[in-house]
Image (spheres, rainbow, N blue to C red):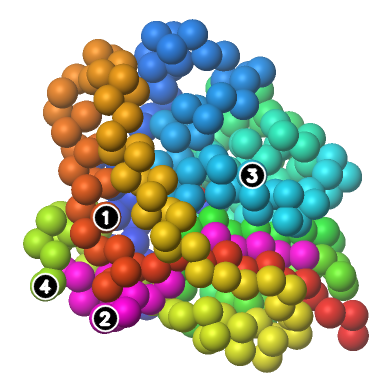
Amino acid sequence: MDSAIKNNLIASYQVDGGFIVHDRVMLEKLYALLGIDPKTSLDWRIFDLEGITHFFQHGVVTLVRKLAITKDDYVLSLGEGSGAPSRLIVKMTGCRVAGVEINPDQIVKARELSDLHGIQDKVTYYQQDVEEMSLDKRDFTKAYCNETCGHWQDKGEAFRRIYLHLIPGAMIGFNTWLKGNKGSLNDAYDAVFEFRPLYKKEIWFQDNLSTYQRLLEQTGFRVLEMYDCTDRVDIKIRARVKASVQWQRYEKVMGSQAKDNALRYYNAMLKTHYDFLRYGVIIAEKTFP
Ligand SMILES: C[S@@+](CC[C@H](N)C(=O)[O-])C[C@H]1O[C@@H](n2cnc3c(N)ncnc32)[C@H](O)[C@@H]1O
């Protein structure tokens, strides 16, 4: 990944950026108010607050089921972020996870939150670029990538690196941001003014499903399932924006500015849907040599 892109990417995922990232102190306040214990609970609001993803908990649980992850799996997470999907997967299944993340600040948050969830023994983090990834472990039985590979500049190389770290027959699942009908989110900076402050520029490398299929198959993966789910994600985000009781509770702890920022984020992203952003799910397996 070019260094200018890497810098913009890292700057996009900060607590005070346009994208909402809650730190441990904020989360502890919210959980106390909501009466949730993150060590024992699979309450969807935990994921909502820690992940701020577009597929929400439901989308990650669907991926876990499609990949049939169990306690015996050793899972590679590509683009770990602050780790909400991995914490959910560990608590759902008891598996081990290794998270690869380019942004050191995200890894700090992931570590803090794995401690808050009491799962620190099940997770390991590597600060690396997936496009250059080289880990000391190469026996992963499953891999997943939640809403991350739309940032990968050279997906062919990233897939090749991932391939080298998986055992034959290992399955990989993607919840991914695809190119829209008019272009990528790079084009949305001009067309959707509300989108401009949310992320730094030129960090988007979205593709369509057929490009994913071609690149995965060229690498040695077999695509088992692949579909566009833009309608479903769009409806879920619209419902989230309208969940007024949730927002009232959120405002009580975080204040009205945080609530307005969160709503501004979702409303702006909704404006990019279809034209500059679509969503897809891909399930593939590493073929036997
Ligand atoms: C939208 S966040 C998603 C994080 C996490 N998967 C989740 O669902 O909560 C994307 C993350 O991927 C990371 N990322 C993007 N490209 C990467 C790369 N080439 N190598 C490692 N991490 C990357 C970013 O730094 C960011 O933390």
The residue stretch that appears in magenta: 171-189
Q: Position of residue 192 (x, y in %)?
A: 14, 65
State whether label 4 is within 8 Å of ligand 1.
no
Q: Position of residue 113 (x, y in %)?
A: 53, 30
Between label 4 and label 2, give the one nearer the viewer.
Answer: 2
Q: Give the mark, 1 or 3, whose residue is nearer the N terminus.
A: 3
Circle 2 residues within 10 Å: few <14, some 14–19, many ≥20: few
Q: Label 4 amino acid?
A: Asp
Q: Name which residue lies at 27% across and 46% down.
A: 266
* Callouts 1 and 3 close, C-beta under 8 Å: no
Residue underneath mark 2: 182
Q: Give the mark, 1 or 4, whose residue is nearer the N terminus.
A: 4
Q: Is residue 156 above or below residue 113?
A: below
Residue underneath mark 4: 190
Q: Label 2 amino acid?
A: Lys
Q: Quadrant of residue 15?
A: top left
Q: Which mark is residue 61?
A: 3
Circle 1 residues within 10 Å: few <14, some 14–19, many ≥20: some
Q: Quadrant of residue 21?
A: top left
Q: Does residue 35 belong to the magenta stretch?
A: no
Q: Give the mark, 1 or 2, whose residue is nearer the N terminus.
A: 2
Q: CA distance from mark 1 to mark 4?
A: 16 Å
Q: Label 1 amino acid?
A: Leu
Q: Which mark is residue 270?
A: 1
